[in-house]
Image (cartoon, helix red, strand yellow):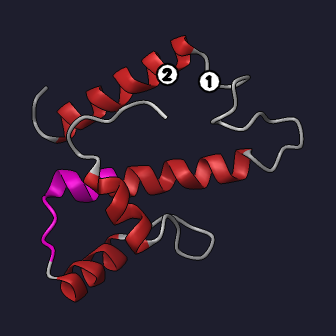
């Protein structure tokens, strides 16, 4: 997996909440309930990022059902160029969610 600078704790939150609820992504209602139960108050960008990660997880879980699909962590699927492109995308998303442009 590419290194994540700033916001890596959100991955922990995603797994604590559950990356999916049933057959769908995390909803705002579920995020609100989780916040109330844990006492953690998410910033709007954090909630949007968790929903986006949940949607991405759902998409990948559906795509992974294809018998010929390479695992996202395999050497076939993850070249150094892919790692760098993904890392850049993650940094860009995190910056935009934090209001950094």
What residue is drawn where x is 49% and y is 64%? 19
What residue is drawn where x is 12% and y is 71%? 41
Q: In this view, which residue lies farthest toward the top? A: 81
Q: Main secondary structure of the magenta part?
A: helix
Q: What element does badge 2 sit on?
A: helix
* Distance from Cα at disc 2 to Cα at disc 1: 6 Å
Query: In this rendering, would 56 be left or right of 98?
Result: right
Q: Mark 2 sits on what residue?
A: 83
Q: In this view, which residue lies farthest toward the right? A: 67
Tell me if residue 36 comes above or below residue 5 in the rendering. Answer: below
Q: Residue 3: horizontal and vertical position, in percent?
A: 36, 32
Is 42 included in the stretch rendered in magenta?
yes
Which picture quadrant has residue 50? bottom left
Tell me if residue 11 comes above or below residue 77 in the rendering. Answer: below
Query: In this rendering, would 28 be left or right of 78?
Result: left
Is 24 included in the stretch rendered in magenta?
no
Determine contact: label 2, label 1, CB under 8 Å. yes
Quadrant of the rendering where the C terminus is positioned: top left
Q: Mark 1 sits on what residue?
A: 78
Q: What element does badge 1 sit on?
A: loop
Total marks placed: 2
Tell me if residue 2 comes above or below residue 34 in the rendering. Answer: above
Decide which of tag 2 and tag 1 comes sooner along the chain. Answer: 1
Mark 2 neighbour class, 10 Å CA radius: few under 14, some 14 to 19, many 20 or more: some
Q: Residue 69: horizontal and vertical position, in percent?
A: 80, 36
Q: What segment carries the magenta color?
A: 40-49
Mark 1 neighbour class, 10 Å CA radius: few under 14, some 14 to 19, many 20 or more: some
Q: Residue 99: horizontal and vertical position, in percent?
A: 10, 36
What residue is drawn where x is 23% and y is 46%? 7
Query: In this rendering, would 84 be left or right of 88?
Result: right
Q: Residue 76: horizontal and vertical position, in percent?
A: 73, 22
């Amino acid at each position: 997996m590419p290194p994540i600078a700033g916001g890596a704790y959100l991955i922990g939150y995603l797994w604590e909440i559950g990356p999916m609820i049933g057959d769908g992504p995390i909803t705002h209602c579920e995020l609100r309930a989780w916040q109330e139960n844990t006492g953690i108050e998410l910033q709007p960008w954090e909630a949007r990022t968790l929903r986006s990660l949940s949607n991405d997880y759902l998409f990948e879980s559906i795509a992974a059902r294809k018998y010929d699909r390479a695992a996202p962590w395999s050497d076939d699927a993850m070249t150094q160029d892919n790692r760098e492109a993904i890392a850049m995308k993650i940094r860009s998303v995190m910056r935009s969610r934090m209001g950094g442009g």
